[in-house]
Image (tube, grey):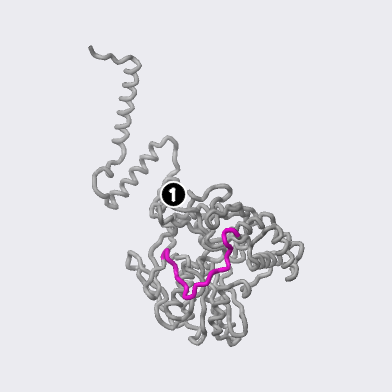
Amino acid sequence: MKDRIPNSGRLLLAVASMALIVFVLALAAVPTIAAQGGQNSPDQSLALFEQVYRFIQRNYVDEVDPEVLIEGALKGMFDSLEDPHSAYLQSEQMRGLTDTTSGEFGGVGMYISKPVDRADGRPRYIEIVSPIEGTPAYRAGVQSGDRIKEVEGESTADLSTDDVVDRLRGAPGTDVDITILRGTDLEFPVTLTRAVIQIPTVRWEMIDNRTGFLRIIQFTPHTADRVRDAIEEFRGTGYDSLVIDLRSNPGGLLNGVIDVADLFFDEGAIVETRGRIPSENRTYNARSGKVVSEDIRLAVLIDDGSASAAEILAAALKDHDRATLFGSTTYGKGSVQQVRRIGDAGFRLTMSRYYTPAGTSIDRTGIIPDVEVAEARLSESEQREYVELRQENRILEFVERSGDPSAAEVGSFIRELREEGVEMGDNHLRRLIRLEVNRALNRDELFDLEYDPVLRHALEYLRR
């Protein structure tokens, strides 16, 4: 005897059959190019994209702005490259990029990146390449290698670099709250007050009557002119040695660093770029523009915040045996991007990688110094004490009470902290107090011989 289907079952079966027919008809309307087997040709892929785009426009449940669809597709196309330096840029991001390369923009003053974890290939939190000297981020004690875990309470794990830049920028005088992750697990909040960021490209001063100190902060179209001014001034003093400080220099324009390197060489390669298309394969040679003679001894200071164009200059000076490098291994940003405009928007695309005169790629590996010197950085336990002192405003309150404290007042304050259980080393405490005094008094010290071991090692080398 056959089983009978109840009426309710017949109804469900009829509904399911109708849904299946509708689904099949819908599939018939969708492009079938992708099912033809094998890899699509570029023309087939573009045709597929156009057909899907039109299908969404005609059939999606809500009306969609065509520009939103196209922008989403462009963003996804660049995201699929898994290259943190390539991105689709909306109109406001293009304006921001122009401001940055021209030397003035609004924000908090730091260069950021989003590296990919080499173990699992997943993006990590936003990483600070370097704070810009004299900016809110720099004054707040943000460091190269710090990670931004949150912006205004929102995790950066799923945000792109450009997304975070958009959130950090805003009207001057307004605040933005970020959460910093330092080391393995040290986490603390920082409030930054936005300002108009003017990037000084070069600063200089004589250390003594023989040694010039040249701090290159950023490579812009004006950097070479400022370096030339500095060298002319050093010449007037009869200098015989020069310290070039590239620490926390995030790079800048390729032409800017070529023009600067040209001041140190008469001939030979400065950098080579290699890409997939012939026009990107190029060697940049010195153009007989040298103004620093061979008898001037050079020492270059680098660290993990030295990136891109800063690495090009350091590598060129090292490979030509023109300078000795001191400090720690650089950031390792060895790729070259071009920016193209599309109407008000545009994109940034990695077109080539650069190679040192010795033929070495430094992408993701960096430049190793000739003389490795550890920076005076806090241990993890000292970092925790530092965060607690910041949160309690202990050092700031001491400076506000004392104004410009004497050595005796500083010593008394350190003894007071010791009685409360603070174990941070004396040198670190004195340096933190000095930095806070300089901020409070708006005192701008270009170099610090007392608390800068990298500079001291370079000077010892030059004076030998």
In terms of secondary structure, what is the magenta stretch mainly? loop
Is label 1 in a helix, a strand or a loop? helix
In the image, residue 378 lies in the stretch drawn in magenta: yes
Q: Quadrant of residue 340?
A: bottom left
- Residue that numbered label 1 is attached to: 71
Q: Name the image quarter holding the N terminus.
A: top left
* Residue at screen point 46% across, 67% down: 308
89 sits left or right of 408 in the view: left
In the image, residue 80 lies in the stretch drawn in magenta: no
Residue 213, horizontal then vertical, whole percent: 58, 78
Residue 318, horizontal then vertical, whole percent: 45, 77
Q: In the image, what residue type sits under mark 1?
A: Glu
Q: Name the image quarter holding the C terminus.
A: bottom right
Give above or below for 78 relative to 197: above
Residue 269, horizontal then vertical, whole percent: 40, 77
* Residue at screen point 38% across, 75% down: 358
The span picked out in magenta is: 363-381
* Residue at screen point 27% across, 52% down: 41
Residue 264, horizontal then vertical, whole percent: 48, 81
